[in-house]
Structures are given as structure tokens and as C-alpha cells.
Image: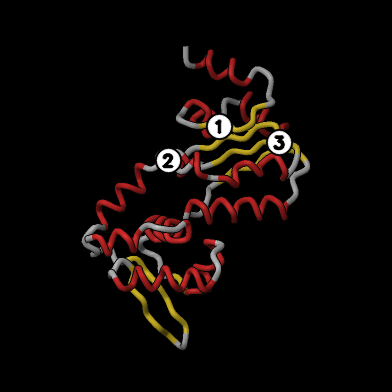
Amino acid sequence: MSEILESLFGSKEKARLLRFFLQNPESVYEFGEIVRRNMIKGNRAKRELLSFVRIKLVQKRTKQGKNYYQLNQNFQYYPELKNLIAKSNVYPQCQSLGKISKIGHIKFAAISGVFISYPKSKADMILVAEGVSKARLKNLMESLEAEIGKEINFVLMTMEEFKYRLNMLDKFILEFLEGPHEELINKISGLKRFIAQRKL
């Protein structure tokens, strides 16, 4: 038991890989993709993956000279680990969220879904912004996905589009704003009042 726990926890890289596999239990990943998606150095990833394979948390296959890895759902503590990840709120630990303001002129940014363990949400993030740098947005999402261990479902729109959809009482927008979420940036005057009045 102690060896297993020591192999599961102990470093940022280990925790990141653990979350990655638990969030994507059905998928098979080539070593290079694991390194890229989790933003971990190859030698550290190799070491942590070896410890996972040793305790049979992860299965390793070699095909045409390449190593592939997949979560072993028959691992004895899989249900407990899965519940631990499902209940954990990753929002406070996501340092990359602090970079949102650097991708453009952000009017509104809010998170839900995977960030706050609310699977019913149809989006993990809504961004309302102007002059967004595609390169910076791509880097932001890659960093967040590396921290979370899962692809982020986000929606980006201009202020004009957001106001139009809000005025049309767009179901998707209203469900997001009226459901569980965390606001990171809100420079839209009257938005909180509008939502509060709908809840009366």
C-alpha cells in the first residue's frame, strides 16, 4: 500500500500525469503526445510513467518502436482515485488562468465545467473579448489543458455577439450564467444585475 501511494503522489509531474490518465480512461497515448500535452520534460515523464506501469496503474504497449500508454481500469484503487479526481476543484490550482488578461482586451471571462467539477455545464469557459491573439489563446489553452489533464471546451465571442445573444435570451448563455460558475473578469456593466433579476 505504501509503495503504491508513494508512486501515485510526490511530484507535480506525477500528479499531472495521474489526473491526465484518470480524466481520459479510454484513450491510448503515445509517449511523445503525453509529454507534449502535459508539458513535462521527457525524462521526468518517463520516470513517472515507469512507476505507474510498475504498480499496474497504467498499461504499456510497444508498437513499431513506439511506446503507448493507457489507464488500467482494473487497477485496485481505480474507483477511489476516480472519485478523488471527480470531487477535486482544480480551479484554485490553475496558475495559467492568471494569463487570460494577456490574450487580448477581455470584457468577460468565466469558468465552469471541469474547472469546478460541474459536468452538467455545456462549456468549461466563456470568453468575451476583442483583439484576441490566436497564438496567445492557443498557448493559454494548452497550458490549462496540461494543468487539468483534459481538453477544455471553451467559447470565445466578441462583445457585440455576446450582447446580441444575451438580448435574444440565448439558452446556452443563460444556462451558463445562471448555473454554477466562477467569474474571473467582468467588465460588462449591468450583467450581474441582469442575471440577479432573472433569478427573482
**Residue on which disc 2 sits:** 89
* Image position, residue 27 (x, y; %): 40, 65
**In the image, what residue type sits under mark 1?**
Ile
Q: Which residue is mark 1?
A: 173
Q: Compared with residue 15, is residue 127 higher up or lower down, i.e. above or below?
A: above
Give the mark toward the camera: 2 or 1. Answer: 2
Residue name at image x 36 percent, y 48 percent: 85
Q: Quadrant of residue 69?
A: bottom left
Residue 143, horizontal then vertical, whole percent:
59, 54
For the residues marked 3 and 1, what is the alpha-carbon distance in whole angstroms?
A: 17 Å
Mark 3 or mark 1, earlier in chain: 3
Location of mark 3 (residue) = 106
Nearer the observer, 100 or 4: 4
- Identify the secondary structure beneath mark 1: helix
Residue 200, compared with residue 107, is above or below; it is above
Find residue 177 and report its horizontal and vertical position in percent: 53, 28
Q: Amino acid at mark 3?
A: Ile
Task: Indicate the position of residue 1 as horizontal and vertical percent values.
Answer: 22, 61
